Image (cartoon, grey):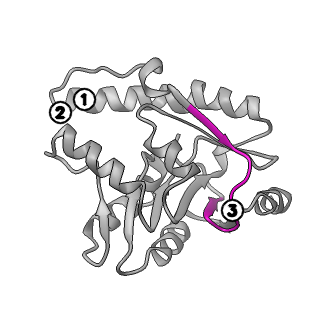
Amino acid sequence: MKKLIETLESCGYKVHFVERKEEAFDLASSMIKSGMSVGLGGSTTVKDIGLLDSLVKREDITLFNQYEKGITMEENTNRRRKGMLTDIYVTGTNAITRDGKLVNADGSGNRVAALIFGPKKVLVIAGINKIVDTLEDGFKRLMEVAATKNVDRMNNLAKINGKEPRHNLDNIANKFTYIKADEQDRINIILVNEELGY
């Protein structure tokens, strides 16, 4: 783990290693200061550690929450756009390679775009299950694990909400990125010594 952290930091990322998701929640919460504007990328990890629910309840930040129930698709898109120009963008990642690359795919592209450019800071929260050896392994994990599980999750959610299931591997993962480096400390990674998210 020490070698991975050193490699990630050599790529410009600021890395925080914690043992448990409760520690990840506390650390992430402390990074999101009063008065900040906050964008969100789709992430079951952010939800799993309790951070999404916490952010929704905070009245001292401006949260562009595209997941709020009852909003129109137009408002959803508007919030995703505004989220890309925030003080901090909170998300997960599909894979982290041992040579320091962040590997991701999106349907709409807001998350992969924000990871690359836009928000002043990006906060990535990831469990150790996201660590892979190579870039090829990262894309394999992305399609065979993350995208597949997200298709099931989103289609089940659609059914619960009385909507037509419309997600598949073609429309949920059609914009791909890997980042091999970024400006110093713009991307903060909280690496959790637990399996989290997809």
Picture residue at 36% right of the left edge, 22% below the top = 167
Residue 158 shows which numbered tag?
1
For this rendering, which residue is in front, 123 or 175?
A: 175
CB contact under 8 Å: marks 2 and 3: no
Q: Give the CA distance from mark 1 to mark 2.
A: 5 Å
According to the image, label 3 marks what residue? 183
Crowdedness near tag 2: few (<14), some (14–19) or many (≥20) residues, C-alpha within 10 Å: few
Mark 3 nearby-residue class (10 Å; few <14, some 14–19, many ≥20): few
Q: Which segment is the magenta one?
A: 176-192
Work out whether residue 10 or residue 86 is closer to the camera in this orientation and state it: 86
Whether residue 191 appears in magenta in the rendering, the answer is yes
Give x and y (percent) for residue 32: 44, 74
Identify which residue is drawn at 59% across, 49% down.
195
Q: Nearer the viewer, residue 6 or 158?
A: 6
Q: Using a 10 Å C-alpha cutoff, classify the residue at mark 1 as few (fewer than 14 neighbours), some (14 to 19) or many (20 or more).
A: some
Asked if residue 117 lies in the magenta stretch, the reply is no
The quarter of the picture where the N terminus appears is: bottom right
The reply to whether the C-beta atoms of the residues labelled 1 and 2 are less than 8 Å apart is yes
